[in-house]
Image (tube, rainbow, N blue to C red):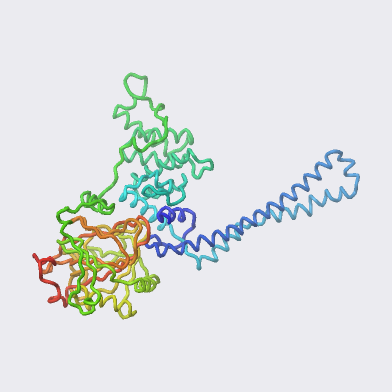
Amino acid sequence: MCILPCLTVLLFLQLNVVLGEMFTALADLEGLVVTELELVKQLDTYIQEEENKLKLLRGHMEEFENMYQEASADVSKYLANPVNAYLLVKSLTSDWKKIEGVMSQNFGSAFLKNITQHRSDLRFPSDEDLNGAAVALMRLQDTYKLDTHALAKGELLGKKYSRQLTAGDCWELGRQSYNNGDHYHTVLWMAEALNKWDDESNKTVAREDILDYLSFSTFKQGNVKEALQLTNELLQIVPYHQRAIGNKKHYEDVLRKEGILLPIGPPNGEGERAEEMILTKPFNTANLKLKKPIDNLEERDKYEKLCRGEKLMDPKIEGRLRCRYVTNNMPFFFIQPIKMEEALLKPRIVVYHDVMSDDEIETVKKMAKPRFKRATIRNSKTGELEPANYRISKSAWLKSEEHDYIFKVTRRVGDITGLDMSTAEDLQVVNYGIGGHYEPHFDYARTETAEAFKELGWGNRIATWLFYMSDVEAGGATVFPPTGAAVWPRKGSAAFWYNLYPNGKGNELTRHAACPVLSGSKWVSNRWIHEHRQEFRRPCGLTFDAEM
């Protein structure tokens, strides 16, 4: 088993690029393994060619050296022999031309040309994929409180899963964060790169490149003194680094105003001299004030806690939850009742177990893969569908008539819920990418998106049915921050809830999110069921949120 985010980021660091959005679905990333294998084969061939070339050149060099040693002992006597004279002339004409021919052989160009010819058959990630993979790693780091140093060592939740990251790998993660304007993570990963650099015998990145990013991001995080220390070290390595020279002056001015640095001129007060502001021990982020950029702090806090498996639900409410067998008065279910587990009573969220077989799951996945497109959201202002950073996955839509399994699955959902599936959207199949997630959202259309489903003519989304088509090793829960409820993926199970009150008003307590996938591949499929033709099908009892 491997920690996919780290391994995939490392793969992205090693490949040139042509395709985009591969990071949004792990199913797409599987093709990169084939690409890597082909590159290994091609690179091995290239290395063998170069080694043969060097072996041939070394043989010529040894012949030249032997001839020189023999001739230099007595040049006149050596050249008096006509054979020797001939061999000397030959070695510097015909033989040397052969050597020039060998030296001019450019196996590298042939190697690259061969790879270019394979690009139509191989899949390559893009710069967008690299950035998406890096951002995903930051997301996982924040959500699951992963220690930077442990993650760089290949450790996940106390267990080693992958090889260590090099200083160069950490630098690239920091650079991607910097390019996104994320100075918080830039400091964390550049600092890790700096500490790893000290231990590397074969340097994978230049120290001045680390210091360049780290010093400025440290300043942007409000740590001016440490930023000046880092900049001074940078200038010791590259004295004429123009940006560093300008930054140094600015940092010194700021520190003088704060009384930390002595003013220019003779010493006449307390404070340090600018030239004394250098690092005297390994850089440690624990000594810094770091500010993580977070929107909607209260909801984000609940969301991340639920994703980590922390209990937020009132124990009294949790104690009332039950599991039972249900038949819904369907003859078939009298023979084989459905296993139902209550996840929440208000609003009512239930989980049905063993409602999708392995054969059905594999068929649906096989049909969906070729159609995958990046999942989108509907812009509340324009009404247009567009990708968003808060939803990282790929999806495809399958119609019931396309396969008997899909037809049976759709009918099963109708039998269990009692709802009319003729006004349900097609089966949406989703595979989540690196750190794949979907931040808190509503499934129903609110006032500002009231026109979202106008073209369907079926009204709003009254209910959501969510199949889990894979087990997930870590992370990937469906959580409801307003209530503290959480449903964890289990292959073959499905979650169900009503999005609307009986009066048609949206239930804000159904606001939910898909937690980032920490390890494993998460597959789900869902049916959104609409209001039309459901007038007498929805239960009227209080147990199904009829209180409004």
What residue lies at 81% left-to-right and 41% top-to-bottom? 69
Above/below status of 217 relative to 180: above
What residue lies at 49% left-to-right and 44% top-to-bottom? 205
Front residue of 269/155: it is 155
The percent position of residue 453, horizontal first and vertical second, equals 21, 71
Above/below status of 161 relative to 399: above
The percent position of residue 412, horizontal first and vertical second, equals 25, 76
Front residue of 234/191: it is 191
The percent position of residue 285, horizontal first and vertical second, equals 36, 38
Q: Quadrant of residue 186?
A: top left
Q: How many marks?
A: 0
What residue lies at 83% left-to-right and 42% top-to-bottom? 70
In this rendering, would 75 be left or right of 453? right
Q: Quadrant of residue 246?
A: top left
Quadrant assignment for the C terminus: bottom left
Q: Quadrant of residue 417?
A: bottom left
The percent position of residue 143, horizontal first and vertical second, equals 30, 51
Quadrant assignment for the N terminus: bottom left
Q: Which residue is the extreme one toward the left?
A: 548
Front residue of 215/351: it is 351
Above/below status of 197 relative to 542: above
